[in-house]
Image (spheres, rainbow, N blue to C red):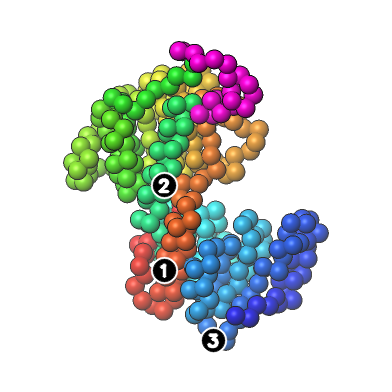
Amino acid sequence: MQVFRPLLFISRVQRFCLRSQSVLFTANKFNKMSTQNRPRVFISRRIPEKGYALIASECEIISWNFDDPPPRNEYLSTVKGINGLFCLLTDKIDVELLNEAGPSLQVVSTMSVGYDHIDVMECNKRNILLGYTPGILTNATAELTMALLLATSRRLKEGIRAVQTGEWGTWKPMWLCGPGLDGATVGIVGLGRIGFAIAKCLKPFGVAKIVYSGRSEKEEAKEINAEYKSFDELLKISDFVIACCALTSETKELFNRDAFKKMKPSAVFINSSRGGIVNQDDLYKALESGEIGAAGLDVTSPEPLPVDSPLLKLDNCIVIPHIGSATHSTREAMAVLAARNLLAGLKGLPMPCQLK
Ligand SMILES: O=C(O)C(=O)CO
């Protein structure tokens, strides 16, 4: 596997080297793998090796081999004339980028189940095939959601801090108590794959009732004894509200002042979907005023959440950095599936997971 850097990229990389020493040490990872007459593919980040190797076996690769994204202007100039794009959920695939890529672009494959970063209509208009990675990150995301729910309701942030600061005195009957899942009503907003997997994880904790809301009732909800409710009713009766819906124009800031007002004052709100479904100012006010009990967020808007965000100052809010799918095997499987989608699309074959 021959790796070289064309002059065009060396000059760009040199500009980065001036700005950041850590980039200097890794700058040679911004590379181009050339083989003649193969489809040209841009991989916009450092990805698990198995996914990269699959693409490398059939394509000419230009890759941005860093964990952080390329600056937008670099991204735009690099996609010119490519046939395939391997992107991440943080990459905005919009009209501007598609115009820069030009008519050669046949396939966009995202290493994510979410696709709110892609202008799907515009890709459809241009006959650009879209691949995504549903299914394989379901269990990892459900597992992390459970971890976040437990950490939030059982006040682990305050507990860990108390140990570290010496605030932990003697065992106190009334100290650091929180709501338990045993006997609770849990509301799942969006009973898709991930919502369903979370419901299954909840069962052994002795929850009394699982309710869900969404566009329509789901046949498979019977399997987990989950009851369909209107969104408002779910908010009213749930001790825990778990947001599992995709970000769409309908769900944008669905969790706002009105929604938080309808929840119980003791309610624990968990979001492992997308930050955009929450109005964060309203969430802060609801948490700060005691309108709801606590919140656990794996996703925020923007990401990363600025360190001066008032949410981070609250004891009753735990924020973690969008790590729902972050297990070794899941991330590898996502990269491999995204690579397979890309290769199939480039060959005009059915993709394992095409977004229609
Ligand atoms: O795949 C996605 O959409 C994610 O959010 C990864 O955790």
How far across and how far down the image is residue 291, in percent?
45, 19
Magenta range: 156-174
How far across and how far down the image is residue 283, in percent?
50, 28
How far across and how far down the image is residue 83, in percent?
51, 75
Q: Which residue is mark 3?
A: 37
Count the numbered circles shown: 3
Residue at (66% x, 33% y) in the render? 308
- The first of marks 2 and 1 along the sequence is 2
Mark 2, mark 1: which one is toward the viewer?
Answer: 2
The amino acid type found where label 3 is placed reads Asn
Residue at (53% x, 39% y) in the render? 320
Quadrant in the picture for residue 226: top left
**Cα distance in 3D space between marks 1 and 3:** 20 Å
- The first of marks 1 and 3 along the sequence is 3
In terms of secondary structure, where does tag 3 sit? loop
How far across and how far down the image is residue 206, in percent?
28, 30
Q: Which residue is mark 1?
A: 341
Q: Which residue is mark 2?
A: 141
The amino acid type found where label 2 is placed reads Thr
Asked whether, in this view, residue 196 is left or right of residue 342, the answer is left
- From this view, report whether residue 149 is shown above or below residue 100: above
Quadrant in the picture for residue 165: top right
Q: Is mark 2 within 8 Å of ligand 1?
A: yes
Q: Nearer the viewer, residue 67 or 39?
A: 67
